[in-house]
Amino acid sequence: MKHFLSFVLCYLVVSAVSVSGYGGDARDGWVIEAQIDTDGPYFGITSANGTLGLVSSREPFKCGNVVLADTYDIFGRGGVANFLPQVNPLELEITVDGNKIEAAACKDYVQRMDLADGTFSGSFVYDGHRVRYAYRALRQLPHAALMDVEITAVTPCDVCADNIHTLPSSQHGGETTSRTLTFHHKEGTRIDLMTTWSLSPTDKIRSVASSAFVADGDPAVYPGGEKRVARLVRRLDAGETLSFQIVGVLISSAQVADPLNQAERIVTSACVQGRDELLRRHRESWDRIWEGDIRIEGDPEIQLEVRSMLYHLYAFTRAGGAFSPSPMGLSGLGYNGHVFWDTEIFMFPPLLVLNPDLARSMVQYRFERLPQAMRNASSWGYEGAMFPWESADSGTEECPVTALAGTLQHHVTADVAIAAWHYYLATHDKAWLRETGWPILEATARFWTSRVVPDDEGKYHIRGVMGADEWAVYVDDDAYTNGAARRNLEFALAAAKVLKVRPPKLWKKIAGSLVFETFENGVTREHASYDGATIKQADAVLLYWPLGLTDGTQALRDLAYYQEKVPAKGTPAMTKCINCIICAREGKTEEALRWFTESYRPNARPPFGVIAEFEGGKNPYFLTGAGGAIQSLIFGFGGYDFTSKGLVRGRQHLPGGWVSLSIGKN
């Protein structure tokens, strides 16, 4: 077994640190630690709570990016809805004796990510003074974050800490206000608020960042002028320690009608609760989520890698709402923050097993956009509901017109329906099926009845599509598209039976008569005109998983053929995850393990091993790849499957060296 993420051997270690409030809880397998230098490549890791994402920076106290879920406007990048860059309410600059602390001047600089609760932290020595800091997006407060800072002086010094609100270039018209609130409870609480509001490019969205210092001694001051700054100044004697926190909130009119007052209310409430109570509730929330842990005995390297992937799946999703993550989750603005089939086919299944409430929000996202999907279908001359290839807040098609996927990749409609039926199989929630699942399944089934084309022999074709293999453009009878449509129709029939609804007879006829072609050697043909060319990613092998339309013999035959057709380098992680599932379930566990580790290790980026979309990629974190890898653990090695009886757990298929594999609460 190779060293854990061997390409960052010099940077990354399994760590068990124990510094209260600064990351780590003295448990091996939960903390990623990196020695930071100023020359090596740096790809940040994200502290997130399903709504707010804070991407780390090499520079102390900084964030490389701040992402607020479900907050879009039309600007730049294709002229479609994009995630909006946001103000960082925790942005901090610290000077010691007038000199700004920067990474280049820090010694013994270590950064850590505690996967147990998403706390990112750093520690270093600056001019002899010991400095520690940490921040986390608070899990119990979706729009709030908390930063801790601790400076211990080795000699007398003057410390100045500036909390700065910097408007990104995409925001305009902003205004910053400051005021002091005093509450008389217990010994009284003084809260010095700084709040900045701004408008999105089209004025559609008002974003608000609000923050407050929490520290003993004299209150923060606001220097004034054009710079949006709250300042904390202290004189430290030798051996004296300054400790303070910043509570920050980021919210927009996409979430509430009055984001300005709501932001200040949340900051005020957090300050009144105090740091210890905030962290207690934060950790309790994460503890409940981590009941859906995966434990691998016998391979500590893979254990930590899996925990990192699971952390990102959990950090980029949230229960109780209707938000669905993009391929890059809350790690940045990649793919414009749009929602693709990646969600339903790669991220959704593992969450459905481990944390169904998180998975439910993904289906709810689609359900709330079902009326728009029906309008989409009508605009193309079809019936029922046609979900967009790229979706944002409204549910309209957000794929730039320069990409044909937005007009041809129709399998996403079936992918949504498949996820809806799988949610029912996992939960047996008949009320949910009647109110939410059935409307999705029924409307998408009607779409396919209007989308298929009959021939004179009683067969049905789906023509002019792009399948999972995006290099095959405008083809007929794509294997995955036809297979997904068939499953959509079959699952709609099954739902109708559960609910005692009489479905159209045409559904069953079409489902049984869609065309699937094979070569003379028995290999499934990717599409009607496929001639053996190189493909971008798996398509035909998806008939085995997740569709369950081919048996193991056929799947191995297809895999042997198509694994030679994908690029030698840059093969998408999702392809390798599907290959892993096929091999694991068919008893080829060592080959499955190879596919599993190859699906993410070549794509991991220093210093934290965050996963990019492809080897050498610069766009981590690729949540689709993480979801695919965790899915292959659960449904490949772990033996889980969807059957007509529901989500079942079968025999495990463990590779050599693995002593045990425990999934979730089981």
Image: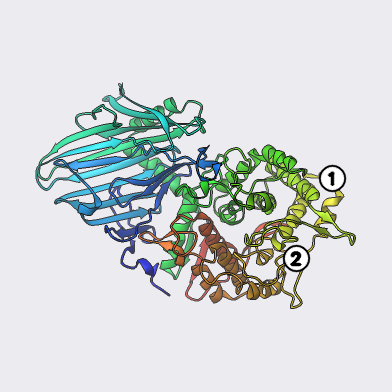
Quarter of the picture holding the N terminus: bottom left
Mark 1 residue element: loop
Residue toward you, 140 or 531: 531
* Rendered residue at 51%/26% (across/down): 257
Q: Is residue 358 above or below residue 187?
A: below
Circle number at residue 628: none
Circle number at residue 502: 1
Residue toward you, 530 or 256: 530
Q: Do the numbered discs 1 and 2 sit on residues whose CB atoms are within 8 Å? A: no
Circle number at residue 528: 2
Q: Is residue 249 left or right of residue 470?
A: left
Kind of residue indicated by mark 1: Arg
Quarter of the picture holding the C terminus: bottom right
Where is residue 168? Give x, y as percent: 39, 38
Q: Is residue 661 above or below residue 501?
A: below
Mark 2 residue element: loop
Q: Quadrant of residue 37?
A: bottom left
**Which residue is outermost to the right?**
456
In this rendering, does residue 434 appear at all?
no
Where is residue 124? Give x, y as percent: 22, 53
Kind of residue indicated by mark 2: Ala
Q: Quadrant of residue 556?
A: bottom right
Q: CA distance from mark 1 to mark 2?
A: 34 Å
In this rendering, does residue 74 appear at all?
yes
Q: Is residue 452 left or right of residue 148?
A: right
Where is residue 51? Give x, y as percent: 47, 41
Specify few, some or many for label 2: CA neighbours under 10 Å numbering under 14, 14-19, or 20 or more: some
Q: Is residue 454 above or below residue 575?
A: above
